[in-house]
Amino acid sequence: MAASLIHLQRWLLDRRQLPFAFGTSDCCLVLADWACANGYSDGAASLRGTYSLRDEMEDLLKSSGGALGLVDGCARRAGLKQSSKRTPGCVGVVGSGHDVLRQWGAIWDGQHWQIHWGIGFEALHAPVLKMWRV
């Protein structure tokens, strides 16, 4: 189930006005949305709607080992395979390996990591901590 670059570009474009919302549309849950759009099961189903405030999200991140631990669990439940090669459409966790509140879920578009915060997605260059093929 390899994601195509055209499919990814269309998917990101369709979400250019998507507002960030903790627990429904945040930087980690959109990774599960992308995986679902490519035929995988929703590895984040158990998390959806369980938090809606920044403090709740921070507590979840701290108790899960950051976005790295949270996304790793979701990726395993969805059946994604870890990858060491960046390919368009792969998902990853980028940011700090030391500060769990400075980690973000992201989608590789072939040139940048696309991170959902604010409205839509924003391109970012950041160290990748782990990634999975979609």
Image (cartoon, rainbow, N blue to C red):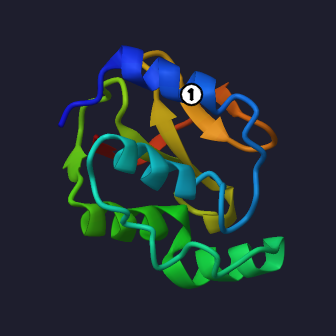
**Location of residue 55 by image quarter:** bottom right
User: 88 above or below 116?
Assistant: above
Residue 19 location, x and y as percent? 78, 45
Residue at 29% x, 29% y is 3
Give residue 92's position: percent from left, percent from top.
42, 45
- Identify which residue is drawn at 18% across, 37% down: 1
Q: Is residue 76 left or right of residue 32?
A: left
The answer to which quarter of the image holds residue 45 is bottom left
Q: Position of residue 124 (x, y in %)?
A: 63, 28
Relative to 50, residue 39 above or below: above
Question: Which residue is pictured at 23% across the width and 42% down the height?
Answer: 83
Q: Is residue 116 above or below residue 14?
A: below
Q: Residue 101 or 7: which is nearer the viewer? A: 7
Task: Tally the marks.
Answer: 1
Amino acid tagged 1:
Leu
Q: Nearer the viewer, residue 48 or 96?
A: 48
Identify whether 28 is placed above or below 38. below
Which image quadrant: the C terminus?
A: top left
Q: Can you give x and y, in whole percent of width and height, for residue 4 in the image?
A: 30, 21
Under tag 1, what secondary structure? Answer: helix
Horizontal arrangement in the rendering, residue 73 relative to residue 70 (left or right): left
| Label 1 environment density (alpha carbons within 10 Å; few <14, some 14–19, many ≥20) | some
Residue receiving disc 1: 12
Question: Left or right: 122 with respect to 33?
Answer: right
The residue drawn where x is 76% and y is 33% is 17
